[in-house]
Image: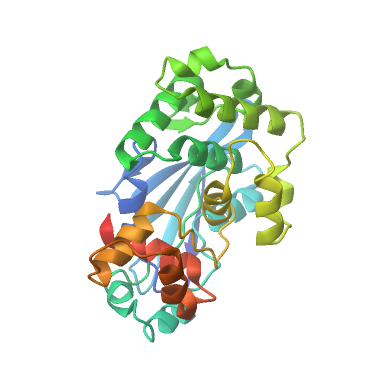
Amino acid sequence: MAGRSVKVEGPYDFDRVLDRLALDPLNAVDQENRSVKVPYYLGGENGEVIEIQATGTTDQPEFMITFENGDNLEAKQNRISAIFQWQTGLHDMHAHFLETDLKPIFEEHVGTPLVLEFDPFATIVKSIIHQQLNLKFAFTLTHRFVTTYGWEKDGVWFYPSPEKVAGLTVEELRELQFSQRKAEYVIGIGQKVSTGELDLNQLAEQTDEEVIKELTKIRGIGPWTAQSFLLFGLGRPNLFPKADIGIQNAIKQLFQMEQKPTMDELDEFSAAWHPYLSYASLYLWRSIE
């Protein structure tokens, strides 16, 4: 065991982070203890469990990180910092939105950071599974997939490796209630990543536009899934997936519209939210969750 204490710039509301993480039954969240256990992937069916516990407040955030061992502590801490976006101060972003028509929800949800999924491959698989499903069934289907083909350590679930996914059959996934196409898409992404045809880590070096162009070449990945990967895989700050039903419903509710906004109306609404569109998306989702 090894532990480190980390202080970050406020505001940062870790309790709201845990609220959102708790929506996914695969996440090992302990809200009473203000902690979450994170899977740290080492390749194949190897990995460690890292626990993050909040010991500070929203205005003065502080965390204790507990590692399984003292190996490669800098790399592991850097990954945790990236997942929870500790290096990204929220003050300037928050001040920006207090001057926009999203002021009410930013005041209500102050200090809510953009938290990444725990692994790039898991991010894109989860996004494909969630395509065109209501949130409850999307989480149910993802849970079936991971608990059937992934692996568990100390109460924490790890997604199956690209190699494991590449070797699955459509028939196996159909038994979990995957559609024919969704099964093909998930297996296909496993094959591309396992062979090196798609390097998810290399995408982190590319622009948003380049990543979208690269990913949408792949069968089963459209703009929504590519933007989801940019948001929750890479933490890009200026993404607005306007085709997302949740965002449309949130805007309809916030602005008391009779119908969901059109694409043109979404462009008009979001014009003032640059360069923090990802946070507009996140806070809009939070407003209806």
Where is residue 100 shown, x and y percent of the image?
38, 83
124, 56: nearer the viewer: 124
For residue 26, what is the image quadrant? top left
Residue 34 seen: no
* Viewer-proximal residue among 56 and 213: 213
| Whole-percent x, y for residue 216 in the image | 65, 46
Residue 7 location (% of width, % of height): 47, 67
Position of 265 relative to 37 (above/below): below
Above-or-below relation of 29 to 245: above
| Closest to the observer, 170 or 194 | 170
**How far from the left and from the top, in percent, is residue 198?**
73, 39
Colour mode of the rendering: rainbow
Pick out the residue farthest to the bottom.
Answer: 99
Q: Is residue 224 left or right of residue 289?
A: right
Q: What residue do we see at 27% from left, 72% from top?
A: 255
Q: Residue at x 68, y 27 (%)?
A: 191
- In the rendered view, tell whether residue 140 sits above or below residue 267: above
What residue is rendered at 57% in x and 46% in y? 222
Horizontal side of 267 relative to 210 (left or right) equals left
- Which quadrant of the structure image shows residue 289? bottom left
